[in-house]
Amino acid sequence: MPKERKIVPIIVSAAIFILMEVAAIHLIRRNDSLQDVWFARGAHKFMAAVWGGSENIKHYFSLGKENKALALENFNLRTELAQVKGEGSDAYIDSISRSIPFIKYVKNFSYIPAEVVKISRNKQHNYLIINKGSEDGVVENSGIITGRGVVGIIDAVGKHHSYALSLMNTDISVSARLGAEGAAGSLTWTGSGSSHCVVRDIPLHFNYEEGDTVYTSGFSAIFPPDIPLGTAGKSRVVNGSSNEVKVELFQDFTAIRYVTVVNNLSRDEINGLAR
Amino acid sequence: MKQYNFFLTYALLVLIQMVICNYFHLSAYVLLSILPVMVLCIPIRFSTTAALCIAFVTGLLVDLLSEGLLGINTLAIVPVAFVRKIVIQLVFGEELFARNEDFSIKKSGLGKVSIALVIVQALFLVVYILADGAGTRPFSFNLARFVASLAAGYAVSILLVDTLAPDSSRK
């Protein structure tokens, strides 16, 4: 017998079965108030589950929108925090051009919210591409951060997109500090695993505790200081002259979507003096 | 003739069920019902839709003509009719359908018939006890009632199987 010819009687039987059960329930409800209340309660629970389920499905499909809103809110909060923590005159910020509405200027840094459109994770020289370019105010050598640490450094800028070297790239290093007042060194990726990096050039005499938070030092003219990057782990002596400290990163590189581009407005001046 | 005999026996058993409902109140824990075995033994040539209709009318008759909650037997027996063919297929296999033969203790064995009886009786009792208790009775009471009723129902039903589904080879 063809499949369709088997399905039709099953559907008919199921429909008749449901009708008969509904009729029986109706009979019971009409004749006993206790059962009436019980069935009504059951029906309400069922309806609540159905409505709850449909709400959950609706909510699931609107997660993208909510994520975007949360990322924007995060960005605003981060810039507000930087403003509160920062030092210097607000007059300086006000003097800076505000031609691009979504750029926030806090002290010497500008912050631009962006979304990652492409990211590589399985190479030695990983990169990411974000959806903001020169027309949005992004410039080369800007940093990319999230609420969980440093993500990368902008390497090339297009009109609407920018190419950045990921922190998971053996070619880049970020100036980092062990603890709030500790020694600074350069944070680099070891080339294996996406959850840890190492801080090199830590003086041998400097003592730290495992579990201390590692922050950006602010010495690099790319990233603002005091961005938490991860926690310090075990160390080893390199060439008998310095320590190399393992750092467990806060940032999960397998789940990055919303980022913030941070640009040091005084970078040219700092670099000029350094030369 | 065979079909005529089945319906005559069936009608007689409906009357017996009414008597049981009205006069045999063994205990609060024992619910004696022969409706599941009656529906299970509806000849195999009857479709599920036909079995549903027979079960619905039987349940309604018992409900109307006996004490108790109106509609509760109907509510509990209709699911038995709905799963009847599935239970027969699972327990006795496809051959019965291929040969269009009804099962009997002699042909299929006491074990298989007992399994089928326990399944349908359990399904009937679960629906009946839950609807009867309406969430007001403790789980322990419902469980004790279920176990006692299942044992009593099985004991009576196994005696009726050969009456409802006699082995044709005996004739």
Image (cartoon, rainbow, N blue to C red):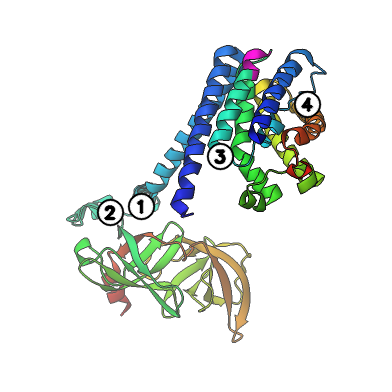
The subunit carrying tag 3 is B
Point 55% across, 29% down: residue: B53
Q: Cα distance, mark 2 to mark 3?
A: 74 Å
Residue tagged 1: A75
Circle 4 residue: B145
Q: Are marks 4 and 3 in contact (CB under 8 Å)?
A: no
The quadrant where residue A258 appears: bottom left
* C-alpha gap between disc 2 and disc 4: 72 Å
> Which segment is the magenta one?
B62-66
Residue found 76% across the figure and 18% down from its top: B20
Report crowding for label 3: few under 14, some 14 to 19, many 20 or more residues within 10 A (C-alpha): some
Q: Can you say whether A213 is above or below A152 in the image?
A: above
Amino acid type at image mark 3: Ser
The type of residue carrying mark 4 is Arg
Query: What residue do we see at 82% from left, 18% from top?
Result: B27
The kind of residue tagged 1 is Phe
- Disc marking residue B47: 3
